Image (spheres, grey):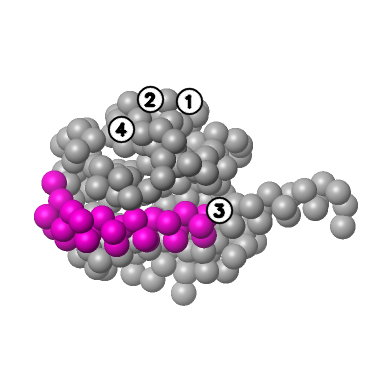
Amino acid sequence: MTLPSLIENHKKQVIVSRLNKVYSTLGNAFITAKEHEGEVDSWNLVDYTQSTEYENNVLYYILPYMKTLKICKNERGCFPDISYGSIGTTSYGVNIDRSDYYSKAILNDGVLITALTHRNNCTNEGSPCAAIRVDVNGSNPPNILGIDLHTFLVFKDRIVPAGAVKTLDGSFYENRGDLCTAHVVYEKNLDFIKDKKCEAYK
């Protein structure tokens, strides 16, 4: 194996390790938040298209139970000022830093975290309260959804990786990279990169 291949494999393993770590941290913070703040249905969550107030975002309830370096709320300064790419043919192209729809923060290990809130009356299947995205290597490239930017979905009783059973499905999400998170969490690899898409995890 050549040196560039070794370096590339190391980078992939760092992504796998960091994503699994943040998944565990998120899950624990979510449990603690519910213990202290009540069930999700009682949180004052509002769809991001109707409110950009930090107090209406799911991170407002979860971040107090995570170790953070910086909380930007809905302001700039926690994400790189770039438009994120997608792993496949469906464009993503979102500049998270410039969008006030997203609440944002930097965790103490350098992971960037953001969330879009959808509703407070979520279920445990098919209707998440919010989507949380994490850039596991901070502002460093490649800044691509499905490689270093990953998605978790907040349901009534749990947080799960996008692409897990009964979360998201369909070619739009497959080709954009949303569903890759489940593959990284459960398979512990990024072998899907060569296919430039991720199907829902079975």
Q: How far across and down, in percent of the image, does residue 1 sit?
A: 87, 57
Q: Measure the C-alpha gap from mark 2 to mark 4.
A: 8 Å
- Per the image, the residue denoted by label 3 is 18
Q: How far across and down, in percent of the image, does residue 156 sit?
A: 22, 63
The reply to whether the C-beta atoms of the residues labelled 3 and 4 are less than 8 Å apart is no
| Farthest residue, direction bottom | 202
Residue 25 on the magenta span: yes
The residues colored magenta run 19-44
The reply to whether the C-beta atoms of the residues labelled 2 and 4 are less than 8 Å apart is no
Q: In the image shown, does 45 or 178 lie closer to the viewer?
A: 45
Q: Secondary structure at mark 2?
A: loop
Residue found 32% across the figure and 45% down from its top = 63
Q: Measure the C-alpha gap from mark 3 to mark 1.
A: 22 Å
- Per the image, the residue denoted by label 4 is 73
The reply to whether the C-beta atoms of the residues labelled 1 and 4 are less than 8 Å apart is no
Q: Main secondary structure of the magenta part?
A: helix
Q: Is residue 44 visible?
A: yes
Question: Which numbered circle lies on residue 81?
Answer: 1
For marks 2 and 1, the one nearer the N-term is 2
- Per the image, the residue denoted by label 2 is 76
Q: Secondary structure at mark 4?
A: strand
The reply to whether the C-beta atoms of the residues labelled 2 and 1 are less than 8 Å apart is yes
Identify residue type, mark 3: Arg
Q: Measure the C-alpha gap from mark 1 to mark 4.
A: 16 Å
